[in-house]
Image (spheres, grey):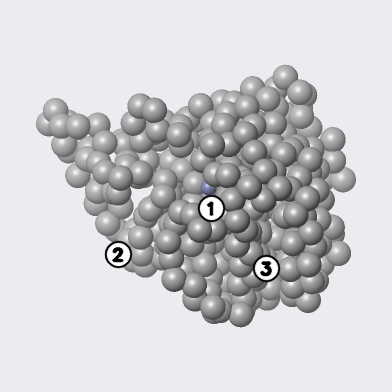
Amino acid sequence: MKPTGYYTHPVCWKHEMGAGHPECPERLSAIEDRLLITGVGDALERREPTPASVAELELAHGRMHVAALRGLHDELREEIAAGGPSHAQLDPDTSINLHTWEAALLSAGAALNATDAVLAGELENAFCAVRPPGHHACRDKAMGFCFFNNVAVAAKYAVERHGLQRVAIIDFDVHHGNGTEDIVAGDDRILMCSFYQHPFYPEWNHSGAANLVNMPVSAYTKGMDIRELIDMTWLPRLEAHRPEMVFISAGFDAHREDDMGQLGLVEQDYVWITQQIKQVAQRHAQGRIVSVLEGGYNLSALARSVEAHLRVLADV
Ligand SMILES: [Zn+2]
């Protein structure tokens, strides 16, 4: 079996949104530490991503959105040089520092590089331990800790640049991937399957498009119930779609120890979910999976859950 790729970059640690913000660089350190002490990291092929190009970002985002973030970055750099504040605020939850632009390009770039390497047959599958995350980033709007939609950019890239006819996006973050829905709704080449706590952040308007398998669940739903719902809703649709590649918006904030949400998943549930995705990928996609980190804010639960996810992907 070919190796599982592990994409990360030092600049992903340098993006931060202020003291005490839950989407913090320590999340990546917790994952690294866990992979080191468990030895799982030894089974992975570490790679450093290259930044996504503006043209690649524009596969999923409007030209003005990309240009506006670039402009905000340049403005902030000038203000900092003139003694101004270190952050520029986009919304109450989301701000940029001097490294955000580069980190955002590298995070999207990781998903693209992983897509290239998996499609080239160099890697069996890949996990991108990157931040900022992406699944709340809409075509024309940054929000909810997200700037560019890493997974949606990669899915569009797989169909537009690699010519794949059918791909799937699985989103198991506790929050709905409203940005991904915004970008892929109505594109029948891309099937998006997700569950998410509802009612909850974010508020958005359902597109009702046929390529979306949305599975809202109430607070305090446990892993066994989620598994049953996945079995009944996602899996038949995935079988029918026969994706040639599977992307994962891998958020781990549905873990029961994660206070950001109120769902009751544990590591074994992430093992089960990853196994189901892997089986779909093996049946239809030559095993090709690119998984990209989204949420997960309890550092211990995040690290254990990523380990569990990677053990299935890398078969260790
Ligand atoms: Zn989340």
Question: Does residue 228 appear to the left or right of 292 in the view shown?
Answer: right
Q: Report the amino acid beneath label 3.
A: Val
Inter-mark Cα distance, 3 to 2: 27 Å
Q: Which mark is residue 175?
A: 1
In the image, the residue with mark 1 has its CB under 8 Å from the nearest atom of ligand 1: yes
**Residue ID for mark 3:** 167
Of pointers 3 and 2, the one earlier in the residue sequence:
2
Q: Which mark is residue 279?
A: none
**Residue ID for mark 2:** 64
Q: How many marks?
A: 3
Q: Report the amino acid beneath label 1.
A: His
Of pointers 1 and 2, the one earlier in the residue sequence:
2
The answer to whether marks 1 and 2 mark residues whose Cβ atoms lie closer than 8 Å is no
Residue 50: give x, y in percent of width and height: 51, 45
Front position among marks 1 and 3: 1
Q: Report the amino acid beneath label 2.
A: Met
Residue 239: give x, y in percent of width and height: 80, 71
Inter-mark Cα distance, 1 to 2: 26 Å
